[in-house]
Amino acid sequence: MKKYVIIVAGGKGLRMGGEVPKQFLPIKGKPVLMRTVEAFYQTDVRTGIILVLPKEQQDYWKKLCCQYEFHIPYTLADGGCTRFHSVQNGLKAVPDEETDALIAVHDGVRPFVSPQVIQACFDEAARWGAVVPVLDMVDSVRQLSEDGGSIAVDRSRLKLVQTPQTFRNDILKKAYSQAFTELFTDDASVVEASGVSVALVVGNRENIKITTPFDLKIAEALLKG
């Protein structure tokens, strides 16, 4: 069964406070995005890697690949005006006739996803058709009420969602043929809106999304030890 991963990297780095997009920032001497691509390639070199980048960032990325002698094969797709449209563009690189192919969709700024989680997502997607990795909540949670107050929520009924969210090709392409709505917060919400239930697998705590300077410090610490 053919496997693909669409790695979406369209951030502008605004929360980092700098001009360099967050996916290109180095952690321990290598750009974040390269470490993310390596995570999937090192798990299974047969996985087809589709990298989605805004057109205006693609030349810079190619220069980085030359600078770091980065030679992992991938297909480049253009980023869209939203993450939804970026995934749509990435899906064009997967042949329609490969209906039972498995497609993972992953955030370009999550370089610490484990091989075990990647494999579990593909394995369970082959079984169920649609899966997402999740973590248990460790903090107490409160829900805001309309009167300005808040109420406690049973955290055992809540999960933190990660990527790679993984689906069978025919399921994901059908879902992404829908019209865009602001209610689509991730790939799972798009798939559920098409009428398909999504199963859960256990993620890994290190699989953080690097979006702030503090996240970069955590990333450096993870690489050190």
Image: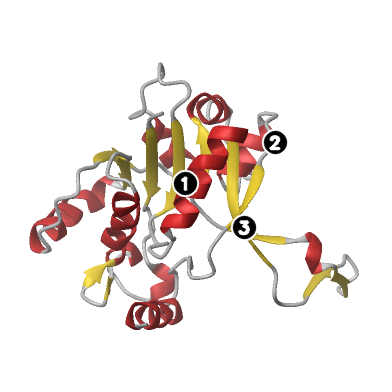
Q: Amino acid at mark 1?
A: Arg
CA neighbours of label 2 inside 10 A, class few (<14), some (14 to 19), many (20+): some
* Of the image marks 1 and 2, the number of the one nearer the N terminus: 1
Instruction: Identify the secondary structure beneath mark 3.
Output: strand
Q: Amino acid at mark 3?
A: Val
Q: Quadrant of residue 188?
A: top right
Q: Is residue 132 left or right of residue 68?
A: right
Is residue 118 at all visible to an observer of this figure?
yes
Up-down: is 96 above or below 138?
above
Q: Residue at x 35, y 43 (%)?
A: 79
CA neighbours of label 1 inside 10 A, class few (<14), some (14 to 19), many (20+): many
Answer whether labels 3 and 2 touch (C-beta < 8 Å): no
Residue 141 position within the rendered picture, expressed as x and y whole percent measured from the top left = 77, 73
What's the mark number on residue 83?
Answer: 1
Instruction: Identify the secondary structure beneath mark 2.
Output: loop
Q: Find disc 3 in the rendering and name its residue.
A: 134
Q: Residue at x 62, y 57 (%)?
A: 134
Is residue 181 at all visible to an observer of this figure?
no
What's the mark number on residue 52?
Answer: none
CA neighbours of label 3 inside 10 A, class few (<14), some (14 to 19), many (20+): some
Q: Find disc 2 in the rendering and name its residue.
A: 197
Distance (Cα) linking label 1 and label 3: 20 Å
Q: Nearer the viewer, mark 1 or mark 2?
A: 2
Q: Is residue 68 left or right of residue 170?
A: left
Residue 2 position within the rendered picture, expressed as x and y whole percent measured from the top left = 38, 30
Answer whether labels 1 and 2 touch (C-beta < 8 Å): no
* Of the image marks 3 and 2, the number of the one nearer the N terminus: 3
Up-down: is 15 above or below 69?
below
